[in-house]
Image (spheres, rainbow, N blue to C red):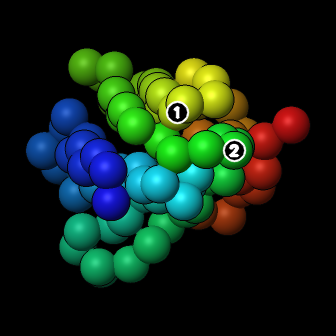
Amino acid sequence: MLRVLFHPEPRRLLLFTASDDAEVKMWDLKSRSLLASLDGHFSAVTGLGVSPCGGMLLSAGRDKVRVYHRESPLWMWNPQASFEST
């Protein structure tokens, strides 16, 4: 585990993690379960950020920077959505 970040809205009990396995994960703290795993990086993810409104997630790795928008199908509010990146 390289980075841990809480969602900025206290009522959303979400935690984002990044690690050297090139994945970003979103956890539901209430149910203690994994909601989503994003595998768009090819090397360690060394940074995470969430916009103040909570609508965007930024992940930075040694390979690239990715931005995920809540309105995008890549965003993680809907665990039923597809999280594969192109």
- Corner quadrant of residue 7: top left
Q: Is residue 41 left or right of residue 17?
A: right
- Residue 60 position, x and y percent, is 49, 28
Which residue occupies 63% across, 29% down?
Answer: 63
Which residue occupies 78% across, 50% down?
Answer: 84
* Residue reaching furthest to the right: 86
- Residue 43 position, x and y percent, is 61, 44
Which residue occupies 29% across, 46% down?
Answer: 3
Q: Nearer the viewer, residue 44 or 26?
A: 44
Which element is circle 1 on? strand
Q: Is residue 75 left or right of residue 33?
A: right
The C terminus appears in which quarter of the rendering?
top right
Q: Which mark is residue 50?
A: none
Q: Which mark is residue 42?
A: 2
Q: Badge 1 is on which residue? A: 61
Q: Is residue 11 left or right of residue 17?
A: left
63, above or below 3, in the image: above
Badge 1 vs badge 2, beta-carbon distance below 8 Å: yes
Q: Nearer the viewer, residue 17 or 33?
A: 17
Crowding near the residue tagged with mark 2, few <14, some 14–19, many ≥20 C-alpha atoms within 10 Å: some
Crowding near the residue tagged with mark 1, few <14, some 14–19, many ≥20 C-alpha atoms within 10 Å: many
Type of amino acid under label 1? Gly
